[in-house]
Image (cartoon, grey):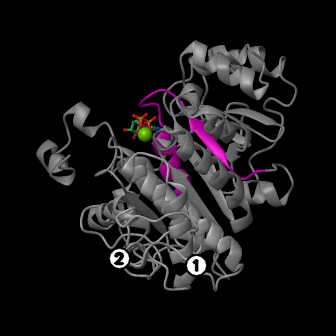
Amino acid sequence: MIPPPRMPARRVLEATSTAATLMPGYGEADHSKLRPLLGASRFGGAFGYNPFTLYAANAVSSPNALVLGKIGNGKSALVKAYLARMLAYGYPALVIDPKGEYRALAERFGEGAVTLMRGGEGVNPFVPPSIGDSASALEFNCEMAERAIEALTGHPVSALEGASVRSVLGALGDKVGFLALRRGLADLDERGGPLEWLGDYQKGSLAEAVVALDRLLQSGLVSAGERAGSLASRLGRGIVAVDLSAAFGSSLYSLAATMVLASVRALQLRPGSPRLVVAVDEIWALGEEPEAARWLRSYWKLSRALGIANLGVTHRLSDLRHGAGAGSAGLLQDSETIVTFAMETGDAEAICHERGLAPELARTIARLPKGSALWQFGKSVCVVDHILTRTERQICDTDARLRGDGPELAALGENPL
Ligand SMILES: Nc1ncnc2c1ncn2[C@@H]1O[C@H](COP(=O)(O)OP(=O)(O)OP(=O)(O)O)[C@@H](O)[C@H]1O
Ligand SMILES: [Mg+2]
């Protein structure tokens, strides 16, 4: 049992006077019965959170959550502790790790991190048509292939490319994979285009798409065969961290993260898959282009049906809107839980406005210390001091190098980028 923290009188006063009187429900709900526990409520007692339990009890209508806040305030530390503790209650997890900082967590609570794009086995985001509804599997697979070709060519797929992709994927059946698609497209080009194509066909029209798929296969991101790739044998067993640090900051990052999430979705379609927590750190980096943002929003919305509770991490709301049009702003609507760490007052005001919180809470958010956050879900609003165990503190420490007590050269060796 986590003991309630000793709280300075000023903070008690601030919490009660600015919030409880302004916001019905603020601090009133009892969160101490939910498991896992994550910390202590400013109103006394332990604070637990579990999106699956809340969803089953109709306390929330979406199990998805967003974690927001300024740099270095404890967002990733909360995600790490949350994943580790959810696992203790039987919920496995996958985390998209753009900085390679979840390795220690995956090593301790799983089988180690999956490294893509550096000689890893790659993922296969395609859905074998024999799993469930083959028409929707074909739609899903066409969308994945087109997303990949668009990201690598830098322009939307042409009508001819789209028809060709559909024709090849439709014929592949369960042997669906990127290498088979690449071969199928090259073959179609030799044979004068897909049968369904009634317009003129010029040889070489599919060459750009074939070259794009060659680049994708060479990147190591996707698996060459039709096997489900690196994730298949690991998903559902402990915490899987997918290390995408080799792509973070590059134009390929959003595609890489999309392919991983699509693979997770495809794998969750397997009958008997356990409920899963999926965390996406630095989620803003996925939704920079409108197409990617739209895909992310549809993933976010639909994953509920697959037993997935998503958790996205970003700095401020404007990150989600930036360049992403209506797509990413929807993440906010489709995430019933919001966890807000300290923010600049203007950003905190934007959150309060969007989420219907009393504007006065912006001051509380702006003054939160490291490790504390305002939680809002269902009818609950609560300030929580997150408490890390000693082991978690070691796993969560991202400041060691700044403090000068980290093996700096070893850390550089970990991430050559
Ligand atoms: N509740 C807490 N108790 C003790 N230390 C904490 C707590 N939360 C975070 N820290 C420490 O603060 C440091 C920064 O935390 P973290 O890496 O989670 O920040 P962040 O918000 O994810 O930052 P960024 O935006 O840069 O990713 C870490 O070294 C972590 O161990
Ligand atoms: Mg972080």
Q: Is the residue 109 above or below the residue 389 in the image?
A: below
- What crowding class fits label 2: few (fewer than 14 Cα within 10 Å), some (14-19), or many (20 or more)? many
As drawn, is 166 to the left or to the right of 120? right
**Where in the figure is residue 305, as x and y percent of width and height?**
74, 64
Residue plotted at (59% across, 13% down): 346
Image disc number at residue 170: 1
Residue plotted at (44% across, 48% down): 254
> Which-is-in-front pick, marks 1 and 2?
1
Residue plotted at (58% across, 30% down): 321
Residue plotted at (73% across, 31% down): 43
Identity, as a three-letter code, of the amino acid under mark 2:
Ala
Seen from the viewer's position, the closer of residues 249 and 342 is 249
Image disc number at residue 207: none
**For marks 1 and 2 on the same chain, the one whose residue lies earlier in the sequence:** 1
Image disc number at residue 224: 2
Is residue 7 covered in magenta?
A: no
Disc 2 element: loop
As drawn, is 123 to the left or to the right of 94? left
**Where in the figure is residue 341, as x and y percent of width and height?**
56, 30
Seen from the viewer's position, the closer of residues 268 and 36 is 268
Disc 1 element: helix
Seen from the viewer's position, the closer of residues 282 and 327 is 327
Q: Is the residue 358 above or below the residue 202 in the image?
A: above
* Region of the chain picked out in magenta, as a range: 62-84
The answer to the question of whether label 1 and label 2 lie on touching residues, with beta carbons closer than 8 A, is: no
Identity, as a three-letter code, of the amino acid under mark 1:
Gly
